[in-house]
Amino acid sequence: MKGLLRKLLFALGVWLTGWTGCNLQNEYSQGPVMNEPDYEKLREKMVREQIQARGVKDPDVLAAMRKVPRHKFVPENMRRYAYDDCPLPIGYGQTISQPYIVAFMTEQLRVRPGMRVLEIGTGSGYQAAVLAEMGANIYTIEIIPELAEQARAVLLELGYTNVHVKVGDGYKGWPEHAPYDGIIVTCAPESIPQALIDQLKQGGRMVIPVGPTWDQELVVVEKENDKISCTEVLPVRFVPMVPGESTNNESSVTER
Ligand code: SAH
């Protein structure tokens, strides 16, 4: 049974978000879970061994990764793997990104307190929580209503009132709150959606995986005096960004 779970997780890891080598060998993946793991200790280890060791330096990013309880954003039966070096399934065929990828993208975004950030692909809400922990105001769009609802509930429970979740099609962005100082996309389109470029502030940065399912590059887009420059920073593997009907069911965690 355990072997099967390993194989399944490995197969998922190969398929999904930003995989760079999944290691489910921590002490909590062996045998039955007796006690609640020491999540704080696991987070510290995650930051040191997976994130700092790979070169992420921004102290504010590291502090946020140390603070946000990642295990709260994964399904209960996945909690023991929450701080492992891999993406994990969150239901509906979607994944929470590998911790390193979350940290790397956040560092690339250059988050500062008070910044207005648009996220496409709320998923579990974890990336949004990391950004919120750094003092940014987040507008995040998710196409699967059930995931948006779950994310809203967890973010509210953890007290992140500076995150606004909307169900909708990320290709259209969220024009009502534009322009954004930063845009972060956590699903991969084949090319950069024009609406997102339009909604980026002059001097703003967008971090976005671009390309077909098996071959994406993480791209940093900078906009200066309407001039767009793109830099490829890392090969990645995200779930595809799917086009959908734009619904208009928006609300903020602060409004609930
Ligand atoms: N940032 C997330 C990971 C998201 S996985 C986290 O921290 O957990 C990518 C998410 O993008 C999925 O939940 C998927 O449903 C969503 N998605 C895919 N296409 C989309 C689109 N066109 N608009 C909005 N969300 C989309």
Image (cartoon, grey):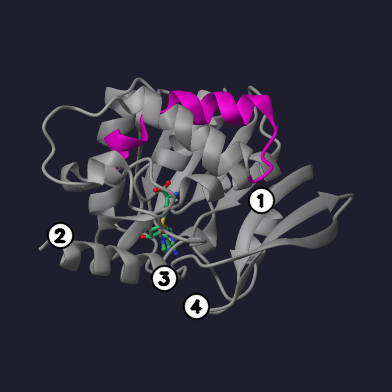
Q: Residues within 10 Å of mark 3 (few under 14, many from 20)?
A: some
Q: Where, quadrant-wise, is the C terminus in this rendering?
A: top left
Q: Is 179 rendered above or below residue 97?
A: above
**Whole-number angstrom distance, CA of label 3 to CA of label 1:** 33 Å
Identify residue type, mark 3: Val
Residue at disc 1, secondary structure? loop
- Sequence-earlier tag: 4 or 2: 2
Q: x%, y% of residue 222? A: 79, 52
Q: Which residue is mark 1?
A: 199
Q: Nearer the viewer, residue 210 or 252?
A: 210
* Disc 2 C-beta below 8 A from ligand 1: no
Q: Which numbered circle lies on residue 184?
A: none
**Whole-number angstrom distance, CA of label 3 to CA of label 4:** 12 Å
* Disc 3 C-beta below 8 A from ligand 1: no
**In contact (CB < 8 Å): disc 1 and disc 2:** no
Residue at disc 2, secondary structure? helix
- Sequence-earlier tag: 3 or 4: 3
Q: Which residue is mark 4?
A: 213
Whether residue 177 is visible to the viewer of this picture, yes or no, is no
Q: x%, y% of residue 179? A: 67, 42
Q: Which residue is mark 2?
A: 2
**In contact (CB < 8 Å): disc 3 and disc 4:** no
Identify residue type, mark 4: Thr
| Residue 41 figure quarter | top left
- Sequence-earlier tag: 3 or 2: 2
* Disc 4 C-beta below 8 A from ligand 1: no
- Range of residues picked out in magenta: 54-74
Q: Which residue is mark 3?
A: 14
